[in-house]
Image (cartoon, rainbow, N blue to C red):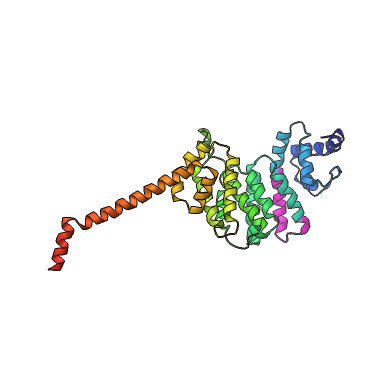
Amino acid sequence: MSATATSLLQPLSESLTTIARGADARALRAHLEGRGLPILGGDAEPAELILRALGETQDPQKFAASLAPILALVIAECMAERAEELTPILQLLLHQALRLAADLPASAMLAGRLRALAASLEEATPDFWYQAPLAPLVARALVHQQTDAQTEPLWLRLLETSGEDPWTPERRTVLLSAWRGLLHVPPDKEAAHVGRVIDMDRVERGLLALEAGVRSREGGPRLVRQALRVLTETFPRSPQFWEERLGAHIAGWPEGLREAAARQWSGLESIIQQQAQEEDLFELLTQLSEISDEESPEVVRAEDELRR
């Protein structure tokens, strides 16, 4: 960042330091509304300028964490005012608040306010997640503000219902955000203690829900493949890692999901073929067993009795 930009951001940095120390929600709201911001040129929005100014403070991470609960208070005020009407001004404020929330350290208080905001907006507008312009921003903020598994039911519900209603770019964005959100659910204390970051049962539930939701949609297979790429980007592991862990589950998956997984990890193809051979062998043995039972002495005697 240039010296000129740094000097222009200095007053905002000092203001944010004061806000963090005094938990001044009113002053933070004023900045989010565009007041007291430096003019740097370009089209930088209030949330972006606040984040840049945080980087100029003495301890950026500390002050960013301090802003999270204060931002939660701002969002709570927005919710109280929204009880009457979501005015354009209030919508712009929420727009900036959600952008800022997505880039602050995770806070249980802020996460709780975001969940409450999402529930309130969805109650007022049943198709909120699929049509409202704020939906992608709410989803992104929720993804990055998870401190526990409380948002997991929402992610699964959004994945499971992704096949209903009109298919729009916003809907696709929310769908992939729900998938990312599910992958970013923090491990519980026991799993974290042993270093188990990836919950394979949760991954499988999410994949099955997503695949079922987009199965009848145009471009559905492409979205499934994209979801698998997101999985590997979120948890960079060797192909062998995924083949060993997914191979134990893949037999019960729908054909489309099996094909997408085998395309992502080629080693799964041999596992799928082996499982198919085992299924064919089991069916053959079952048929042979039925034939053998029909020719057993008990069956023959029963048939003779019927003939008499």
Residues rendered magenta in the picture: 70-89
Most common secondary structure along the magenta stretch: helix
Q: Residue at x 66, y 45 (%)?
A: 110
Residue 72 lies in the magenta stretch = yes
Q: Position of residue 108 (x, y in %)?
A: 62, 43
Residue 76 visible: yes
Nearer-the-camera pick, 263 or 90: 263
What is the count of numbered marks? 0
Give the position of the C terminus as an image quadrant: bottom left
Give the position of the N terminus as an image quadrant: top right
Vertical position of residue 240 compared to residue 78: above or below:
above
Q: Position of residue 186 (x, y in %)?
A: 57, 41
Residue 122 falls left or right of residue 40: left
Residue 16 lies in the magenta stretch = no
Residue 306 falls left or right of residue 63: left
Nearer-the-camera pick, 157 or 189: 157
Furthest residue toward left:
308
Q: Position of residue 177 (x, y in %)?
A: 63, 49
